[in-house]
Image (cartoon, rainbow, N blue to C red):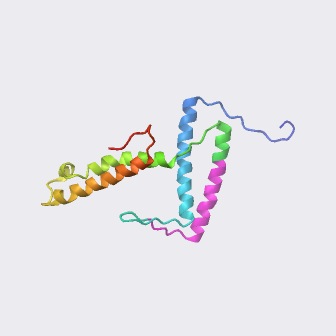
Amino acid sequence: MRGSGVKKKRVPQLGENHRRGIATTLTLLDEALCEFEQWAGGRELRSVLYEERNTLSPEQRAKILAEVAQMRERLRKLRDALGLEGSVRDAATAIWGQCSGLWEHLVELEAKHLRRYGELPPGLARYLDPQVAALLLHLRQISRSCSSPSQGEVG
Protein backbone atom coordinates (compact mmCIF):
# COMPACT_ATOMS: atom_id res chain seq x y z
CA MET A 1 0.00 0.00 0.00
CA ARG A 2 2.98 2.28 -0.31
CA GLY A 3 2.30 5.47 -2.10
CA SER A 4 -1.46 5.12 -1.90
CA GLY A 5 -1.72 7.71 0.85
CA VAL A 6 -3.91 5.39 2.90
CA LYS A 7 -2.48 4.24 6.19
CA LYS A 8 -3.56 0.84 7.37
CA LYS A 9 -3.97 0.62 11.12
CA ARG A 10 -1.66 -1.88 12.71
CA VAL A 11 -3.51 -4.21 15.04
CA PRO A 12 -1.61 -5.47 18.07
CA GLN A 13 -1.10 -9.21 18.38
CA LEU A 14 -3.46 -10.82 20.86
CA GLY A 15 -2.78 -13.64 23.24
CA GLU A 16 -5.12 -16.62 23.10
CA ASN A 17 -6.96 -15.66 26.31
CA HIS A 18 -7.67 -12.15 25.02
CA ARG A 19 -8.72 -13.52 21.64
CA ARG A 20 -11.12 -16.00 23.27
CA GLY A 21 -12.61 -13.36 25.59
CA ILE A 22 -13.15 -10.87 22.79
CA ALA A 23 -14.57 -13.53 20.47
CA THR A 24 -17.01 -14.73 23.14
CA THR A 25 -18.39 -11.25 23.78
CA LEU A 26 -18.65 -10.38 20.10
CA THR A 27 -20.31 -13.73 19.36
CA LEU A 28 -22.96 -12.97 22.01
CA LEU A 29 -23.47 -9.58 20.37
CA ASP A 30 -23.80 -11.20 16.95
CA GLU A 31 -26.36 -13.66 18.33
CA ALA A 32 -28.39 -10.74 19.73
CA LEU A 33 -28.18 -9.01 16.33
CA CYS A 34 -29.78 -12.10 14.77
CA GLU A 35 -32.70 -11.76 17.17
CA PHE A 36 -32.99 -8.00 16.54
CA GLU A 37 -33.07 -8.73 12.81
CA GLN A 38 -35.83 -11.29 13.30
CA TRP A 39 -37.93 -8.79 15.26
CA ALA A 40 -37.27 -6.12 12.65
CA GLY A 41 -38.53 -8.66 10.12
CA GLY A 42 -41.79 -9.00 12.02
CA ARG A 43 -41.18 -11.98 14.30
CA GLU A 44 -43.83 -12.57 16.94
CA LEU A 45 -43.78 -15.84 18.83
CA ARG A 46 -46.90 -17.07 20.57
CA SER A 47 -47.27 -20.07 22.83
CA VAL A 48 -49.15 -21.04 25.98
CA LEU A 49 -47.35 -18.88 28.57
CA TYR A 50 -44.96 -16.94 26.34
CA GLU A 51 -45.81 -14.31 23.80
CA GLU A 52 -43.86 -11.69 21.93
CA ARG A 53 -45.67 -8.57 20.85
CA ASN A 54 -43.92 -6.83 18.01
CA THR A 55 -44.94 -3.18 18.09
CA LEU A 56 -42.03 -1.94 15.99
CA SER A 57 -43.10 0.58 13.37
CA PRO A 58 -41.84 0.29 9.78
CA GLU A 59 -39.47 3.19 10.49
CA GLN A 60 -38.09 1.52 13.60
CA ARG A 61 -37.64 -1.74 11.72
CA ALA A 62 -35.73 -0.01 8.93
CA LYS A 63 -33.47 1.81 11.42
CA ILE A 64 -32.76 -1.39 13.32
CA LEU A 65 -31.90 -3.27 10.13
CA ALA A 66 -29.58 -0.46 9.02
CA GLU A 67 -27.79 -0.44 12.38
CA VAL A 68 -27.52 -4.24 12.41
CA ALA A 69 -25.94 -4.15 8.94
CA GLN A 70 -23.39 -1.55 10.07
CA MET A 71 -22.60 -3.50 13.22
CA ARG A 72 -22.10 -6.69 11.25
CA GLU A 73 -19.68 -4.94 8.92
CA ARG A 74 -17.71 -3.73 11.95
CA LEU A 75 -17.80 -7.25 13.41
CA ARG A 76 -16.41 -8.63 10.11
CA LYS A 77 -13.55 -6.13 10.27
CA LEU A 78 -12.82 -7.00 13.89
CA ARG A 79 -12.96 -10.72 13.13
CA ASP A 80 -10.51 -10.35 10.26
CA ALA A 81 -8.16 -7.88 11.97
CA LEU A 82 -7.96 -9.80 15.23
CA GLY A 83 -8.04 -13.28 13.73
CA LEU A 84 -11.19 -14.23 15.64
CA GLU A 85 -13.02 -17.44 15.01
CA GLY A 86 -16.78 -17.63 15.04
CA SER A 87 -18.76 -20.35 16.69
CA VAL A 88 -21.30 -22.75 15.29
CA ARG A 89 -24.32 -23.55 17.40
CA ASP A 90 -25.63 -27.02 16.74
CA ALA A 91 -29.41 -27.21 17.27
CA ALA A 92 -29.34 -30.65 18.90
CA THR A 93 -26.61 -29.59 21.31
CA ALA A 94 -28.41 -26.33 22.12
CA ILE A 95 -31.70 -28.13 22.80
CA TRP A 96 -29.96 -30.72 24.94
CA GLY A 97 -28.22 -27.96 26.90
CA GLN A 98 -31.44 -26.06 27.48
CA CYS A 99 -33.13 -29.25 28.64
CA SER A 100 -30.33 -29.73 31.15
CA GLY A 101 -30.74 -26.18 32.45
CA LEU A 102 -34.54 -26.36 32.60
CA TRP A 103 -34.52 -29.69 34.42
CA GLU A 104 -33.51 -28.13 37.74
CA HIS A 105 -36.07 -25.34 37.44
CA LEU A 106 -38.88 -27.81 36.81
CA VAL A 107 -37.81 -30.03 39.72
CA GLU A 108 -38.04 -26.93 41.95
CA LEU A 109 -41.77 -26.75 41.13
CA GLU A 110 -42.39 -29.95 43.08
CA ALA A 111 -44.34 -29.37 46.29
CA LYS A 112 -41.43 -30.27 48.58
CA HIS A 113 -39.42 -27.41 47.05
CA LEU A 114 -42.30 -24.93 46.85
CA ARG A 115 -42.72 -25.11 50.63
CA ARG A 116 -39.81 -22.71 50.96
CA TYR A 117 -42.27 -19.99 49.93
CA GLY A 118 -44.67 -20.95 52.71
CA GLU A 119 -47.33 -23.52 53.43
CA LEU A 120 -49.02 -24.87 50.30
CA PRO A 121 -52.78 -24.72 49.79
CA PRO A 122 -54.49 -28.06 50.47
CA GLY A 123 -54.44 -30.35 47.45
CA LEU A 124 -51.81 -28.39 45.51
CA ALA A 125 -49.09 -31.00 45.98
CA ARG A 126 -51.44 -33.78 44.83
CA TYR A 127 -52.30 -31.77 41.71
CA LEU A 128 -48.95 -30.17 40.86
CA ASP A 129 -46.45 -32.98 41.44
CA PRO A 130 -47.88 -35.29 38.73
CA GLN A 131 -48.00 -32.34 36.30
CA VAL A 132 -44.35 -31.55 36.99
CA ALA A 133 -43.44 -35.23 36.66
CA ALA A 134 -45.13 -35.32 33.24
CA LEU A 135 -43.30 -32.17 32.11
CA LEU A 136 -40.01 -33.67 33.27
CA LEU A 137 -40.76 -36.84 31.31
CA HIS A 138 -41.44 -34.82 28.15
CA LEU A 139 -38.26 -32.81 28.71
CA ARG A 140 -36.32 -36.08 29.08
CA GLN A 141 -37.83 -37.31 25.80
CA ILE A 142 -36.81 -34.13 24.00
CA SER A 143 -33.33 -34.44 25.47
CA ARG A 144 -33.06 -38.06 24.35
CA SER A 145 -34.12 -37.16 20.84
CA CYS A 146 -31.20 -34.71 20.65
CA SER A 147 -28.60 -36.79 22.45
CA SER A 148 -25.69 -38.39 20.77
CA PRO A 149 -24.24 -41.47 22.46
CA SER A 150 -21.49 -39.28 23.92
CA GLN A 151 -23.83 -36.75 25.57
CA GLY A 152 -25.80 -38.89 27.95
CA GLU A 153 -29.23 -37.79 29.08
CA VAL A 154 -30.90 -35.15 31.24
CA GLY A 155 -32.29 -36.18 34.62
Task: Please state the horizontal and vertical placement of residue 123, each as a whole percent of the image.
Answer: 14, 60
Q: Is residue 135 magenta?
A: no
Q: Residue at x 57, y 66 (%)?
A: 60
Residue at far right of view: 3
Task: Please state the horizontal and vertical placement of residue 153, each as a whole percent of the image.
Answer: 37, 42
Residue 134, above or below 56? above
The rendered magenta stretch, by its main secondary structure, is classed as helix
Closer-to-camera residue (108/118): 108
Task: Please state the horizontal and vertical placement of residue 87, each as a whole percent of the image.
Answer: 56, 42
Q: Residue at x 59, y 69 (%)?
A: 59
Q: Is residue 66 magenta?
A: yes
Is residue 98 shown to the viewer in this render? no
Q: Residue at x 56, y 55 (%)?
A: 34
Q: Is 4 on the left or on the right of 24, as rendered? A: right
Q: Is 93 on the left or on the right of 63, as rendered? A: left
Q: Is 51 on the left or on the right of 72, as rendered? A: left
Q: Which residues are magenta?
A: 52-74
Closer-to-camera residue (58/92): 92
